[in-house]
Amino acid sequence: MSTTHKKLAAWVEEIAALTTPDQIHWITGTDEEAAQLNQALVDSGTFIKLAEDKKPNSYYAASDPGDVARVEDRTYICSKDEKDAGFTNNWMAPDEMKGIMRDLYQGCMKGRTMYVIPFVMGHLEADQPMYGVEITDSAYVVASMRVMARVGSDVLKQMEETQADFVECLHSVGAPLAEGEQDVPWPCNDTKYIVHFPEERAIWSFGSGYGGNALLGKKCYALRIASAIAHDEGWMAEHMLILKLTNPEGKTHYIAAAFPSACGKTNLAMLAPTIPGWKAEMVGDDIAWMRFGEDGRLYAVNPEFGLFGVAPGTGWSTNRSAMETIEAGNSVFTNVARTKDGDVWWEGMTDEKPAELIDWKGNEWTPESGEKAAHPNARFCTPISQCPMAAAEYDSPNGVPISAILFGGRRATTIPLVAQSRDWTHGTYMGATLSSETTAAATGAVGVVRRDPMAMLPFIGYNAGDYVQHWLTIGQKGDADKLPKIFQVNWFRKDDDGKFVWPGFGENSRVLAWVVDRLEGKAEGVESPIGLLPKPEEINTDGLDLTDEQLATALAFDKASWEKELPLVEEWFGKFGDELPAELRAELDGLKDRVANA
Ligand code: GTP
Ligand code: SPV
Ligand code: MN
């Protein structure tokens, strides 16, 4: 065994005996190793190398058409007690699940290499480094994990020195190869399981090679397992971007924002402000771990090292920084379209569509094809360090103090552009009742409104009632004037013609400016039943092609739509049963009164 870490050595030996790989490869993290793995992926047909003068050291992969997104219906929280998984999660008794999965894992790496990836989520020099080790039989997973997390020998060495505990992350694509059998470009299995054992801090994943199902440091560890750890230890693991915003006076605020999958976190994290004098820098684009600092403020760390971003909609006019990040190379593109000259393309990258492409399914494509060239959940996987507007703090072990938290989602109606909560409890209510139209980031129907508490519906690793209570508890622990102020936002409200009323993207800086003005006491706002709304004149619309009526539509509290919304919230709260915290019930009761009297 290539480690002096006793627990790790024993675990690797046990898994190798179960899965019977041809060989074991301990990932060191060097560039030479990456080059070898990339070449092996090209040789096996998983990767196509992109043209060096277009996207240096970058690769294209097309998944199996049935393995393109997270599989929420195959995702389980296997706590000992069913009650601890709560109503938002699938559950099975741990022993029963392990029985099923051991049968699946039996010999599942035959004909393949088993890779052992030591990694750390967050900084290696954090006060409490959060280690993990992923065992996988997918070189694609290794290539992606290398971008998304800090991996390799440095991590292993530090783990060995302290015999540190780590999260066991077991992954197999579930496609053993018989003697002499030719591999397919994207091995996977129709049977998929994404399973978490929160008490053991362990993850077992089988059958999928797709991002959130297979790069286990990301959603499985940094959200589901970490949220359970955070609940026990008094901190927070959240589905949030972290943005550093500096106003024209030079004052900096750090803002965290929770939006459901494919609802705009990466884009807001890479905001290009359209109002003069404002500067935005990115600290994180998907996950925030927040702990109280000694000064009583909440500090957020981005536990990741890379960006796994939605490709479609990312373009030179909407997200220039993301385009520059991928231009720098060292990236993996999955389920995008390819140009004939060895580059990538997707819907929304350029205003004009290329005359011909090879679509994500490998077919010849022209603008007349009538089909999308890239899958709607096509992704780029690229190092944060290459992002031209990354704040130096993305790599800080201790994180940044958060001044404001935003909750947002895709809602065509009802939810205004921005509203400030009265206090932390009201803000927790806004988060707990957050809703959004479903997107292609998970399998299943798209465009259906569902409740998505704190944008964590698919990622809460324990009982949702305990989770919202944990938010309230954090608020009780914190000092009211040091806690972040909580706001709700909605970039996706539509007019009667079905068009977005707010232009979004860089123009969202105008909304953030109001948020900052509120933090600094420069904007007064106007009370409404649902929270404090901006006065229209408090939103800077200089140079914006927006009529007063359109602004009013974006900002409006609309009584009729809230009368329709309240029964939906009532139904949602009903699902919590007696686990619904009384404070949240009281918030709903108060809201009902205010809406009725409006
Ligand atoms: P995950 O990586 O799945 O967690 O997604 P995300 O929350 O980071 O979403 P992302 O920023 O990748 O945006 C998803 C889609 O929404 C992309 O197609 C964007 O172009 C689009 N989008 C993002 N911000 C805005 C906005 O302000 N307005 C509009 N209309 N669309 C937006
Ligand atoms: C999401 O779906 O929220 C993502 C992509 O960020 S994945 O890592 O696949 O979960
Ligand atoms: Mn996400």
Image (cartoon, rainbow, N blue to C red):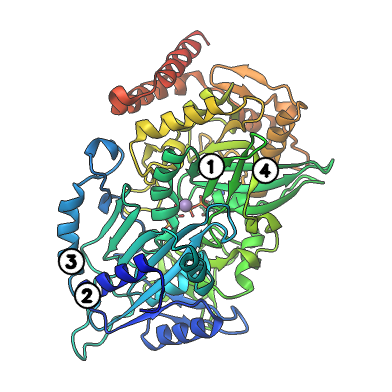
Residue that badge 3 annotates: 104
- Badge 2: few (under 14), some or many (20 or more) residues near its Cα, within 10 Å? few
Tell me, yes or no, whether the two marked residues, 1 and 2, touch with CB atoms within 8 Å. Answer: no
Viewer-nearest residue: 224 or 418: 224
Residue that badge 1 annotates: 499
Tell me where residue 392 appears, x and y as whole percent: 70, 58
At x 48% / y 70%, what residue is drawn? 156
* Of the image marks 1 and 2, the number of the one nearer the N terminus: 2
Type of amino acid under label 4: Tyr
Q: Examine the image and state in which quarter residue 52 appears.
A: bottom right
Tell me, yes or no, whether the two marked residues, 4 and 3, touch with CB atoms within 8 Å. Answer: no
Tell me where residue 596 appears, x and y as whole percent: 46, 10
* Of the image marks 3 and 1, the number of the one nearer the N terminus: 3
At x 22% / y 75%, what residue is drawn? 17
Residue that badge 2 annotates: 17
Relative to residue 432, is residue 148 depicted above or below? below
Quarter of the N terminus within the rendering: bottom left
Tell me, yes or no, whether the two marked residues, 3 and 1, touch with CB atoms within 8 Å. Answer: no
The answer to whether 528 appears left or right of 220 in the picture is right
Q: CA distance from mark 3 to mark 1?
A: 48 Å
- Badge 3: few (under 14), some or many (20 or more) residues near its Cα, within 10 Å? some
Q: CA distance from mark 4 to mark 2?
A: 48 Å
Relative to residue 554, is residue 176 depicted above or below? below
Tell me where residue 203 appears, x and y as whole percent: 32, 57
Q: Examine the image and state in which quarter residue 375 appears.
A: bottom left
Relative to residue 562, is residue 446 depicted above or below? below
Residue that badge 4 annotates: 254
